[in-house]
Image (cartoon, rainbow, N blue to C red):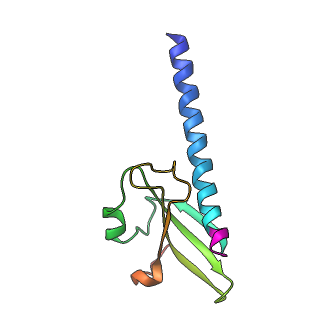
Amino acid sequence: MVTFWIVLTAGIIAYTTWWFYRTRSMVKRWAEHSRLKLLDYSVMPFPPYPPIMVTLTTSRNQLIVRMRVYDDSIHRIRHGWLRLGSFWWGLMNIDAVEVFWAEHQGLSNEPGF
């Protein structure tokens, strides 16, 4: 019985560590491929919340991340959300990243950005 709890605890710790590592690597990889400098990011559900259509079309396998980046081509900071993972496979698909910019959603002046 003790072995079961040790294996379960080790599995939970391993999965949690992988989850945080995978989230960080997906966000950094997206920023590098988009030629943006990542300033910071946070995992939802911290306010401000993404637009309702982003939330409604996101599966439980996917993750929404709020992020701020510096766009050197226009010399300004941009805010928005990233939807990480595919609908069915979640974070297993490292290339599945979709961006939603706050200025395109009319939310660039939201408090908390």
The region drawn magenta spans: 31-35
Using the rendered view, name the quadrant where residue 94 is placed.
bottom right
| 18 displayed left or right of 87 | right
Say which residue appears at 51% left-offset and 24% top-offset.
Answer: 8
Q: Is residue 96 above or below residue 38?
A: above
| 101 displayed left or right of 10 | left
| 23 displayed left or right of 103 | right
Viewer-nearest residue: 88 or 58: 88
Please indicate, yes or no, whether residue 89 appears anywhere in the rendered image.
Answer: yes
Is 82 inside the magenta-drawn segment? Answer: no
Please indicate, yes or no, whether residue 113 appears anywhere in the rendered image.
Answer: no
| Labels in figure, total | 0
- Secondary structure of the magenta portion, mostly? helix
Residue placed farthest to the bottom in the image? 74
- Residue 4 x/y as whole percent: 51, 16
Say which residue appears at 40% left-offset and 84% top-offset.
Answer: 106
Using the rendered view, name the quadrant where residue 95 is placed.
bottom right
Say which residue appears at 62% left-offset and 55% top-offset.
Answer: 24
Is 33 inside the magenta-drawn segment? Answer: yes
Viewer-nearest residue: 94 or 20: 94
Viewer-nearest residue: 71 or 95: 95
- Residue 91 x/y as whole percent: 50, 50
Viewer-nearest residue: 18 or 97: 97
- Residue 96 x/y as whole percent: 50, 60
Residue placed farthest to the top in the image? 1
Q: Is residue 91 above or below residue 75?
A: above
- Residue 108 x/y as whole percent: 47, 82
